[in-house]
């Protein structure tokens, strides 16, 4: 079996603030294999973005501090690497943000922005080398050709025309494809996408999802897809991790997890999806706990209709049905005969 591209084990991250220590990430376990898109779902404020920033290497430390667990990327334990080696690994990670309008500069053409990024990667992110190459006609021409090639990979029919345009001249779906092309400019092995289809209409969203799946297979990319939309997770993610208040409470193959959720929180998320049959969705009562003083034991217990005294202790992770994993006292560990 191939080495996982990402493996987080029993991760804990605290934030040291003026108000005290916020226990934002208490127990996160996650694995992403080559060529696989994995979903990370949960309510706003549950720790999804903190986990993504840690993998991207942009989580500010301090105030954040890694208190426990391991972070392995591309077979390397980040805790065992120096700053230069960690920076080298970061070159293999690409990020696709939620809103292209917040990333693409309206004052510059698509060509200018893509060439900047390509030359930056080719310069090994060294500033003086970047300036030298950016003022070289040969390097700029080669970067322009590569930009057109990347736009073709994301199924843009006339790359040369798009390169001449400004972001405001492109539709939302086209701008999102440009961001995907820019993410590929560093030839990444891992792509982290943070709700990249949220602002798109349904038909464009479907085409973008199909494109992401195609890119993962064609470029042999691993992907982490962060979303609160379970329908999108079903479409694009082979496996999904459900995250609540800094803990991964359940994971497994996406279709099985959504069709037969085990954890009460996962069931609550599924029941909150509006139905075409009519009727109001069932909202989960309460809210994500205060990380300055989180509840002991299971963090979902204060909102759980099935909570009992045992939930005051941290639940163990239990393997169910071979491929499902859930952290909940409602389940006992399966025994092998």
Image (cartoon, grey):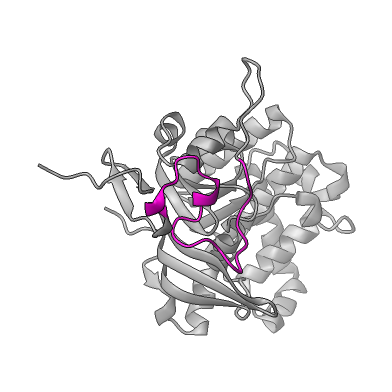
Q: Nearer the viewer, residue 36 or 198?
A: 198
Q: In this view, does 335 lie to the left or right of 326?
A: left
Q: In this view, does 92 lie to the left or right of 164?
A: left
The residue lying at 41 percent from left, 47 percent from top is 308
Question: In the rendering, at what x and y percent does residue 298 appear?
Answer: 45, 55
Q: In this view, does 212 lie above or below 246?
A: above
Question: In the rendering, at what x and y percent does residue 292 appear?
Answer: 61, 69
Question: In the rendering, at what x and y percent does residue 93 appear?
Answer: 54, 62
Q: In this view, does 182 lie to the left or right of 330?
A: right
Name the image quarter holding the C terminus.
top left
Q: Which of 107 and 311 is in front in this view?
A: 311
Question: In the rendering, at what x and y percent does residue 110 appear?
Answer: 79, 53
**First to last magenta residue range:** 285-311
The residue lying at 57 percent from left, 42 percent from top is 212
Q: Which of 146 and 196 is in front in this view?
A: 196
The residue lying at 39 percent from left, 59 percent from top is 313
Q: Is residue 277 left or right of residue 190?
A: right
């Amino acid at each position: 079996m191939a080495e996982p591209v990402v493996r987080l084990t029993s991760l804990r991250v605290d934030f040291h603030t003026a108000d005290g220590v916020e226990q934002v990430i208490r127990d996160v376990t996650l694995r992403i294999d080559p060529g696989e898109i994995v979903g990370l779902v949960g309510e706003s404020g549950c720790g999804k973005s903190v986990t993504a920033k840690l993998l991207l290497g942009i989580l500010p430390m301090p105030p954040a501090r890694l208190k426990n667990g391991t972070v392995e990327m591309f077979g390397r334990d980040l805790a065992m690497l120096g700053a230069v080696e960690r920076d080298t690994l970061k070159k293999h990670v690409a990020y696709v943000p939620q809103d292209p309008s917040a990333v693409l500069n309206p004052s510059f053409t698509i060509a200018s922005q893509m060439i900047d990024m390509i030359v930056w990667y080719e310069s090994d992110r060294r500033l003086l080398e970047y300036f030298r190459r950016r003022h070289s006609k040969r390097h700029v021409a080669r970067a322009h050709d590569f930009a057109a090639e990347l736009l073709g990979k994301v199924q843009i029919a006339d790359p040369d025309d798009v390169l001449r345009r400004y972001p405001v001249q492109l539709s939302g779906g086209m701008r999102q494809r440009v961001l995907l092309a820019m993410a590929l400019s560093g030839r990444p092995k891992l792509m982290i996408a943070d709700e990249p289809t949220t602002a798109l209409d349904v038909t464009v969203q479907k085409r973008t999802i199909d494109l992401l799946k195609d890119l993962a297979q064609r470029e042999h990319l691993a992907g982490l897809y962060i979303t609160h939309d379970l329908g999108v997770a079903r479409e694009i993610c082979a496996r999904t991790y459900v995250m609540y208040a800094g803990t991964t409470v359940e994971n497994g193959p996406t279709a099985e997890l959504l069709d037969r959720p085990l954890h009460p929180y996962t069931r609550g998320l599924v029941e909150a999806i509006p139905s075409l049959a009519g009727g109001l969705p069932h909202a989960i009562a309460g809210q994500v706990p205060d990380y300055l003083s989180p509840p002991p034991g299971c963090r979902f217990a204060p909102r759980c209709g099935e909570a009992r005294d045992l939930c005051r202790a941290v639940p163990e992770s239990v393997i169910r049905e071979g491929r499902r994993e859930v952290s909940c006292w409602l389940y006992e560990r399966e025994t092998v005969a």
